[in-house]
Image: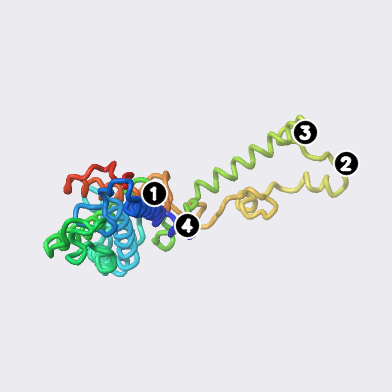
Amino acid sequence: MSKVFANSLMASCLSLLHAYQLNKRKDAILDTTTPNPSGTLCFSWGGDLLVIGIIANYAAVAADTFSSELGILAKSEPRLITSPTFRKVPRGTNGGVTPLGIAAGALGSMIIVTTSMVFLPLCGEGTAGKVGSGLSGWTTQQRSTLMLGLTAWGVLGSLLDSVLGAVFQRSVKDVRSGKIVEGEGGTKVLISGDSSDHADKNQKRAAVKAALLHGEGKAAVEKMEKTDSAIEDIDAPEMSADATRYDPKDKHRKSSFGDAQPSRVIETGWDLLDNNDVNFLMAFTMSMGAMGVAGWYWGVPLESILDA
């Protein structure tokens, strides 16, 4: 659910803004006391930038999804996109790309763009010259230009997601299996160092609490009268290091699997963003970027997204 929210939040906001924009245009057309709006009720060439941003968002996230889900089936090992040598990384590593994954991303982007062009209310010859319907219909060249541009933009979004994931998202590898460990719902994955730090914090917290209550720090334990069994315990030999390692009474003992070596290590990336953060950042960047590029190509200012 959180992944869907991260992927579609930007497009949803743009869709609401476009719906508000269309309602304002419709009201302006029906009101005879106001001049006709400059925008159209159908999608015209060189028209609404918001539509471009919406399509670009879904094209990019579809390309990323297809690339992730189908690219993992590639026979070749993925290569780290941010590595100067494109070193090989385990499957599922953030930033790992394969030719099959890129091709799958292009397929996903093309599906979204083609579907959008089929179902969008495009301005055509039948609407030419009418109020709120633009000056002319779409030509075949204009359709092809827009579809190719948005499809390529979606693939770039998938590659941007790989770059952001490789840099800002931590990839954790299980040393026993050599596979990447993923967090549920796109959340971060804990590693051995995280659990050790957590245990150390608990120990320090317990020591401080004992010092405040009894003034004896770690030695703040209940004093018991010596009995015969207690005397015998004093004479008993101390427990070995291995015995204390497996002592079930020690709540802060560390894992001893593999000679106390960490079972999870960092493969790539900084621990700054999780998968959902990366997805939203990519979708936001590609939506705004697409509107900026389209506005430059059409000669339409970006501020027009707020006009009727």
Instruction: Please state if 182 lies on the left or on the right of 236 as rendered.
Output: left
| Local secondary structure at mark 1 | loop
> What's the image's color scheme?
rainbow
Q: Please tell me the numbered disc located at residue 2.
A: 4
Mark 3 or 1, nearer chain start: 1
Give me the residue at 78% from left, 44% from top: 234
Mark 4 or mark 1: which is in front? 4
Give coordinates of residue 301: x percent, y percent. 23, 42
Q: Are marks 2 and 3 in contact (CB under 8 Å)?
A: no
Q: Are marks 3 and 4 in contact (CB under 8 Å)?
A: no
The circle on residue 213 is 3
Mark in front: 1 vs 2: 1
Label whose residue precedes the other's in the sequence (2 or 3) = 3
Q: Disc 4 or disc 2, which is closer to the eye?
A: 4
Q: Name which residue lies at 39% across and 44% down.
A: 270
The residue wearing badge 2 is 225
Cα distance, mark 4 to mark 1? 17 Å
162 relative to 68, above or below? above
Q: CA distance from mark 2 to mark 3?
A: 21 Å
**For numbered disc 4, what is the local secondary structure?**
helix
Q: What residue would you read off at disc 1?
A: 169
Binning the other alpha carbons within 10 Å of mark 3 as few (below 14), some (14 to 19) or many (20 upward) gives: few
